Image: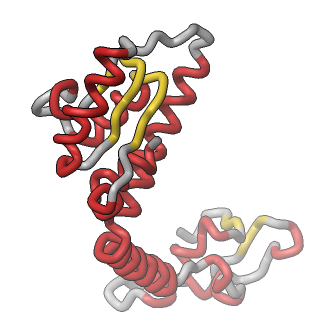
Amino acid sequence: MQDNHFTCGCSNAWSVQWMENDKQTQVVGCTEFTYNYPAELKGTKLLDVELQFCTVHLGLYYYISSTSLVLLTLLASFAYHFLKWQVIDGYYLFLAFLHDTKQRNKHKPRGCQYDILISYNVYDEPWVLKELLPELEVEQGWKLCLHHRDFQPGKPIIDNIMDAIYGSRKTICVISHRYLKSEWCSREIMLI
């Protein structure tokens, strides 16, 4: 190592630290090694220059990353526990927004499969089938979308709801006390 031309910089900081601190290896004459570059440090001994600014203390980075991970885990578990349905609703609202944007960007008139989507609670189904269905479908000739007959079996309910909303020109909500208390009806009305 005696005839080497040393350059002062962070690329050599590890070798200087190794020469000073390694107990198993002895570098003979390391106290006499001098820098050749840059010109203002030419002739300065390697071990005399402070290169502490070149070392990175990883402990701080480990602390920050582990603390961030713990806080993110706590936040995710809090959101899952207390805001689970709001997060799920937000996800499906975002999907609905993307679907709507995609439909708008096609610049084609969208043909609807149904004239009207009827949104109702299962407890209101007798009234819908006996009163509303004959009036709108038989008397007036509208094509209705009813969940009990038009939703695809095996498909997730929220996907069926979104397809029904985007496949219908209009929506009629049969609002009752049970409709307002129903979790799925609340989601359906939020998507409309």
Q: Residue at x 17, y 41 (%)?
A: 126
**Front position in the image: 139 or 98:** 139
Q: Residue 120 location in percent, x, y? A: 29, 44
Q: Is the residue 110 above or below the residue 87 in the image?
A: above
Q: Residue 104 sits in which quadrant?
A: top right
Considering every residue shown, the one lying at the far left of the view is 154
Instruction: Give the percent coordinates (x, y) of residue 111.
Output: 46, 10
Q: How many marks?
A: 0
Residue 8 in the image, given as x and y percentages of width and height: 71, 70
Front residue of 135 and 103: 135
Q: Where residue 136 sits: x, y (%)?
A: 35, 22
Q: Is residue 172 left or right of residue 16?
A: left
Residue 106 falls left or right of residue 170: right
12 left or right of 60?
right
Q: Nearer the viewer, residue 50 or 67?
A: 67
Q: Is residue 18 visible?
A: no
Q: Answer with the quarter of the image where residue 95 lies.
A: top left
Q: Residue at x 82, y 66 (%)?
A: 38
Q: Is residue 90 above or below residue 15?
A: above
Which residue is at 23% across, 41% downward? 127
> 101 or 109: nearer the eye?
109
